[in-house]
Structure formats: structure tokens, C-alpha cells
Image (tube, grey):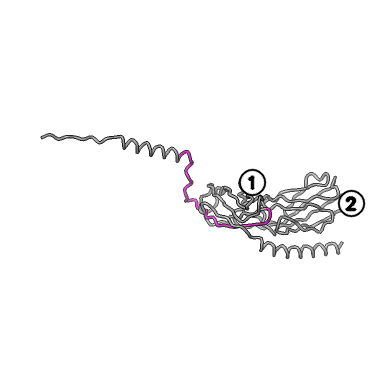
């Protein structure tokens, strides 16, 4: 048992060291914010280039948040999987993710470790795991197994880096075949004034960061209907002024 723990610890140390190097090299792509200063509750357009082709993208707002010991019991363990769950703070910073899988029966407990390779794949010390993965954009992760888990208790416990807010557009974001995307995000209401990082991450580990200035003094954009009505009123007023002829008074001696 001591030998098993020693091997697992050595595996974790080596994997964490290698993924730290991967994480440093994974920052690729770029994003532009329009506008780059906005009020809480308003929207911002995020335009990305240099990302992977036809990949899902997640967008985080604010500072990085280091998460440890986040527990995810698997409700249904029937069959061989896939068994998946979702982190509490997507998107996930590439290279920061790992999880411990504990499979328990009445007579035995089997543990296995999974370390992020920085590209959406995981390295494991398990000989029974197949198709293990992590989706940085959505926070979904999991694995399948070569031996059925019927009646077993299974818990995934994860460590990763997330963000203060998840602002990924409802319905998801996907890149084009050329690795570009355009998405609209909403600034959380009540957010304090200041500068915030906007971080876009795709499922292959490409990542880009831009700075957004949040300022409650910035007026929100008028709705399109209001703009049209104001324009119609301006045109009508101008037309009325043109049609109205000045009254000429002739003064006779």
C-alpha cells in the first residue's frame, strides 16, 4: 500500500511539472472587445482569432480562481460509461486541471489520478480507464472504464483554475474552420467599477486575454426601436420646417 502511494505521488509530481510547462506555452490566439469599456448589465462583443478550428469556446471574466478538493459524486454508475460531470467554475485554464477518481465497493477501494496535458487530453496511472478527457470551455470532464461499475460508489475530486464569472453566451460559442469566433457577453449586474480580464479558452487549450473597463457611468445603448422612433421624429420635424413658408408682411406707405 505504501509503495502504491509513493508511485502515485511520484506520478503526480512529474505530471504537474510537465503540465506547468505546457500551460505556459498554451496561451495562443487573440481577442478584441467592442466596446472595451462598458457598464454593468450591458453587453460586449468578443471577436477572436487564432483559435482551433471548429472548437467550442468558453469565456471567463475577472481574476483566476484556484479550486481544490471540489467533489463530484457520480449518480449513475451502471455499465462502463462514459461517466461525466461538470466543474463549478467553467471555463478551465488549460494545464491547471487534475482529478482523483475513487471507486469503492464493500470490499475494495481503487484510486486513480488524471493530469491535464494542456490540450484537452489527460494522462492517467489507471490501467482500466479509457477515453478520459476534460473540456476547458464547458468544464465537463470524465472517463469510461473497461470493467463495469454496477453497484459501486464513484467520486471524482478535482483541482483546477477557473474564473470569477462565467460569461459564455447562452447556447455556447464555436469557432469557424479558420479558428475565428464572434460572441456577445453580458457584464454581470452590480459589478464594481474597475478593470477586469476577459479570458477566452477553446477545447484544444488555445487561450487569449483582453482587458475590459467596467464603469457604471457609461450610458447603456438605446434600444433599436427607440433609435428608429427618434430618427423618424427628426425626419418628420425637418420635413415640417421645410414645408412651412415664412409669412411675408408688406408695409404700405
Residue at the left extreme, as displayed: 253
Q: Earlier in the sequence, mark 2 or mark 1?
A: 2
| Disc 2 from disc 1: Cα separation | 43 Å
Q: Position of residue 2 (x, y in %)?
A: 86, 63
Q: Position of residue 34 (x, y in %)?
A: 52, 51
- Residue at 61% across, 56% down: 50
Q: Position of residue 86 (x, y in %)?
A: 71, 49
Q: Secondary structure at mark 2?
A: loop
Q: Residues within 10 Å of mark 1 (few under 14, many from 20)?
A: few
The residue to which callout 2 is attached is: 107
- Residue at 72% across, 62% down: 19
**Residue 172 shows which numbered tag?**
1
Task: Check the image and report above or below for 252 versus 183.
Answer: above
Location of residue 211 (image quadrant): bottom right
189, 21: nearer the viewer: 21
Q: Quadrant of the N terminus?
A: bottom right
Residue at the right extreme, as displayed: 107
Q: Are marks 2 and 1 in contact (CB under 8 Å)?
A: no
Q: Is residue 75 left or right of residue 192?
A: right
Asked whether residue 211 is drawn in magenta, I would say yes
Q: Position of residue 39 (x, y in %)?
A: 51, 50
Q: Is residue 93 left or right of residue 44?
A: right
Looking at the rendering, the stretch of residues picked out in magenta corresponds to 203-226
**Residue 105 shows which numbered tag?**
none
Q: What is the number of callouts on the image?
A: 2
Q: Residues within 10 Å of mark 2 (few under 14, many from 20)?
A: few
Asked whether residue 66 is drawn in magenta, I would say no
Amino acid at each position: 500500500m505504501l509503495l502504491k502511494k509513493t508511485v502515485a505521488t511520484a506520478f503526480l509530481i512529474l505530471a504537474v511539472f510537465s503540465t506547468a510547462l505546457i500551460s505556459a506555452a498554451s496561451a495562443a490566439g487573440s481577442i478584441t472587445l467592442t466596446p472595451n469599456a462598458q457598464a454593468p448589465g450591458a453587453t460586449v462583443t468578443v471577436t477572436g482569432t487564432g483559435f482551433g478550428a471548429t472548437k467550442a469556446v468558453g469565456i471567463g471574466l475577472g481574476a483566476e480562481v484556484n479550486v481544490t478538493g471540489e467533489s463530484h459524486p457520480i449518480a449513475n454508475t451502471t455499465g462502463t460509461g462514459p461517466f461525466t460531470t461538470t466543474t463549478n467554475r467553467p471555463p478551465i485554464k488549460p494545464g491547471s486541471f487534475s482529478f482523483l477518481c475513487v471507486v469503492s465497493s464493500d470490499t475494495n477501494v481503487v484510486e486513480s489520478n488524471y493530469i491535464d496535458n494542456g490540450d484537452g487530453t489527460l494522462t492517467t496511472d489507471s490501467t482500466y480507464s479509457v477515453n478520459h478527457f476534460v473540456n476547458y470551455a464547458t468544464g465537463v470532464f470524465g472517463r469510461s472504464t473497461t470493467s463495469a461499475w454496477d453497484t459501486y460508489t464513484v467520486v471524482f475530486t478535482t483541482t483546477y483554475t477557473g474564473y470569477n464569472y462565467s460569461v459564455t453566451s447562452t447556447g455556447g460559442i464555436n469557432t469557424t474552420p479558420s479558428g475565428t469566433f464572434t460572441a456577445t457577453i453580458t457584464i454581470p449586474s452590480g459589478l464594481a467599477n474597475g478593470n477586469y480580464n476577459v479570458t477566452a479558452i477553446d477545447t484544444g487549450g488555445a487561450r487569449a486575454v483582453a482587458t475590459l473597463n467596467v464603469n457604471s457611468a457609461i450610458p447603456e445603448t438605446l434600444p433599436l426601436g427607440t433609435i428608429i422612433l427618434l430618427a423618424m421624429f427628426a425626419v418628420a420635424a425637418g420635413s415640417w420646417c421645410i414645408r412651412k413658408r415664412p409669412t411675408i408682411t408688406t408695409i404700405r406707405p
